[in-house]
Amino acid sequence: MAADLSIGKLAKAAGVNIETIRYYQRRGLLDEPVKPLGGHRRYSADEAKRVRFIRRAQALGFTLDEVGALLTLDAACACTETRALAARKLALIEQKMADLAAMRQVLSGLVQQCDAGDGGADCPIIDVLARD
């Protein structure tokens, strides 16, 4: 594919800013094209697709290290390895959701205790946080 995009146009096509492109290059997620003599680096539409892939993977909770692993998978076993990575990510999300539900329950109870109180110096939330 012809390399016809400047870094600014690449960023716009991918829906990110220029610094994001440079950051992905520093992280090794995106190749930095060779700068021609007296010219500017040019990018292809494939790089824009790659940046959008990275952003979508991040939106699903994958870290940049995990995204890097996804980008380097061998096509012969990509689906199996991707599924395993996604299953691990799903398990982490489910654990976080359980942790958040427990936190919500505790905080909800504390707020109810505050609502039942007189709003004075004895605050149930402060009391719980100050326990040894």
Image: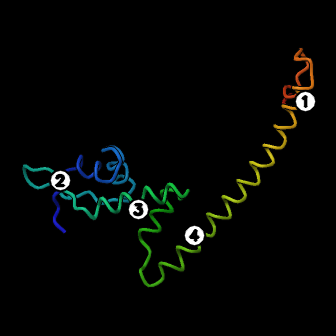
Q: Are marks 1 and 2 in contact (CB under 8 Å)?
A: no
Residue 41 bears which disc, if any?
2
Q: Nearer the viewer, residue 45 or 23?
A: 45
Badge 1 is on which residue? Answer: 113
Residue 115 quadrant: top right
Give the residue type at disc 1: Gln
> In the rendered structure, which disc, 3 or 1, sits on the residue that comes first in sequence?
3
> In the rendered structure, which disc, 4 or 3, sits on the residue that comes first in sequence?
3
Residue 64 bears which disc, if any?
none
Provide the secondary structure element on which disc 1 rests. Answer: helix
Name the side, left or right, on which 76 lies relative to 110: left
Provide the secondary structure element on which disc 2 rests. Answer: loop
Name the side, left or right, on which 65 lies relative to 25: right
> In the rendered structure, which disc, 1 or 4, sits on the residue that comes first in sequence?
4
Instruction: Give percent across and percent down for residue 77.
Output: 48, 82
Give the residue type at disc 2: Arg
Which dot, 1 or 2, sits closer to the camera?
A: 1
Q: Are marks 3 and 1 in contact (CB under 8 Å)?
A: no
Report crowding for label 3: few under 14, some 14 to 19, many 20 or more residues within 10 A (C-alpha).
Answer: some
Q: CA distance from mark 1 to mark 2?
A: 62 Å
Instruction: Give percent across and percent down for residue 102.
Output: 81, 48
Badge 3 is on which residue? Answer: 53
The residue at the point 67 percent across, 60 percent down is: 92
Q: Nearer the viewer, residue 45 or 27?
A: 45
Residue 85 bears which disc, if any?
4
The residue at the point 66 percent across, 58 percent down is: 93
Q: Residue furthest bottom?
A: 76
Report crowding for label 2: few under 14, some 14 to 19, many 20 or more residues within 10 A (C-alpha).
Answer: some
Q: CA distance from mark 4 to mark 3?
A: 16 Å
Give the residue type at disc 3: Phe
